[in-house]
Image (spheres, helix red, strand yellow):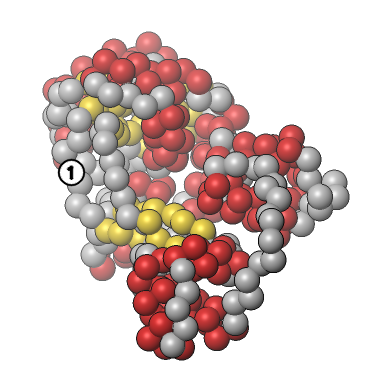
């Protein structure tokens, strides 16, 4: 593929990145183009929501390297800086008055693109030590024999602040404590299948959790020589739940560390589903539930396998971070 891409080739890049969750270097290799080309196409899509190349009329204004340097340093100093704030900084530093439109163009030329901060749980030193020990212990494991189970909270309205980064830079992390959301869902995935999805307004406790396992996991049992992973929330490890698991031959990975959603492949499925749910623009409980169930039904098994395979890469990232957050 040449570097002058057709619209269909550009659409393939967007699909592989947003729907198949492939990295830019992987897409470049599959489509036989440069990684910089992939980055440019994704940048265009993020900024304009279009892949058409618009012809520009007139002579483009020349922005000095001094102005570009001020904008670059301004963004690095404060990733949430607005065009207005950056224009004021340029005025203060150089005495030149530039428009917000020019700032946006400079920001684009500097290859910045918008992202939301990754919301991740707060980690104490104890959490980090446990995560690091678990990753080292299970570094060579194959997760093709694991069933991942998890709950997710879904909110109709969810707004987050934009940060500006360049390709290859790590997305900012915003640590937060768990919050009560509008609908709760539960599901389980494994390399060759998934359960039906449970959607409820109810909050989970040990008895409700056992009810959900009986309704949605039990019909799939036994699942051969599988191990089961769920996180360390209190109701997962009560006597009631442990007895149900034992009676149904559900072998839990008991040393799974707390505060480790990045080690549960279901979390990546939730991320995939939230994009699908948002695209349906639900406006009430009924449409939200319908959007959630539709996203689960449309979830390809190849995507599930990709997320399960990804856990081994996450383990390496956590080890490199001494138990801290993966990327």
Q: Which residue reaches farthest right?
A: 2
The vertical placement of 200 against 155, above or below, is above
Relative placement, left or right, of 82 versus 103 is left
Judged left or right of residue 312, residue 125 is: left
Location of residue 195 in the rendering, given as x and y in whole percent from the top left corner: 41, 19
Place residue 189 in its image quadrant.
Answer: top left
* Residue 37 appears in the rendering: yes
Q: Residue at x 62, y 36 (%)?
A: 15
Relative horizontal placement of residue 157, taking residue 229 as reference (left or right)? left
Q: Which residue is mark 1?
A: 179
Which residue is rendered at x = 44% and y = 35% of the image?
A: 275
Q: Looking at the picture, how far across and down is residue 61, in whole percent? A: 63, 71
Given residues 263 and 294, the one toward you in this image is: 294
**Depth check, front residue: 214 or 169:** 169
Measured from the top left, where is residue 13 in percent x and y? 67, 42
Res 95 → quadrant: bottom left
Q: Residue at x 26, y 15 (%)?
A: 286
Query: Image height check: is 242 above or below 291?
Result: below
**Residue 105 picture location, percent across and down:** 55, 64
């Amino acid at each position: 593929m040449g570097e002058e891409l057709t619209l269909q080739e550009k659409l393939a890049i967007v699909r592989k990145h947003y729907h198949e969750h492939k990295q830019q270097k992987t897409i470049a290799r599959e489509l036989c183009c440069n990684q910089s080309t992939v980055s440019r196409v994704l940048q265009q899509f993020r900024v304009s929501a279009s892949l058409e190349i618009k012809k520009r009329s007139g002579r483009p204004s020349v922005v000095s390297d001094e102005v570009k340097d001020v904008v670059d340093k301004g963004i690095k100093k404060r990733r949430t800086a607005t065009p207005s704030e950056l224009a004021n900084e340029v005025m203060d530093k150089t005495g030149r008055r530039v428009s917000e439109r020019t700032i946006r163009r400079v920001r684009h030329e500097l290859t910045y693109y918008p992202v939301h901060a990754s919301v991740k749980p707060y980690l104490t030193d104890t959490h980090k030590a446990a995560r690091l020990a678990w990753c080292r212990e299970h570094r060579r494991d194959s997760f093709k024999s694991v069933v991942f189970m998890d709950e997710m909270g879904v909110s109709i309205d969810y707004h987050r602040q934009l940060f500006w980064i360049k390709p290859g830079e790590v997305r900012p992390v915003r640590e937060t404590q768990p919050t009560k959301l509008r609908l709760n869902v539960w599901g389980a995935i494994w390399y060759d299948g998934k359960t039906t999805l449970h959607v409820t307004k109810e909050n989970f406790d040990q008895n409700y959790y056992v009810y959900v396992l009986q309704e949605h996991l039990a019909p799939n049992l036994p699942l051969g020589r599988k191990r089961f992973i769920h996180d360390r929330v209190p109701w997962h490890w009560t006597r009631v739940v442990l007895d149900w698991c034992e009676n149904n031959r559900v072998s839990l990975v008991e040393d799974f560390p707390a505060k480790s959603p990045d080690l549960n492949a279901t979390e990546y499925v939730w991320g995939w589903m939230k994009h699908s749910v948002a695209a349906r623009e639900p406006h009430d409980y009924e449409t939200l539930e319908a959007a959630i169930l539709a996203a689960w039904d449309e979830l390809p098994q190849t995507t599930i396998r990709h997320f399960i395979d990804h856990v081994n890469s996450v383990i390496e990232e956590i080890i490199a971070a001494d138990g801290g957050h993966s990327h």
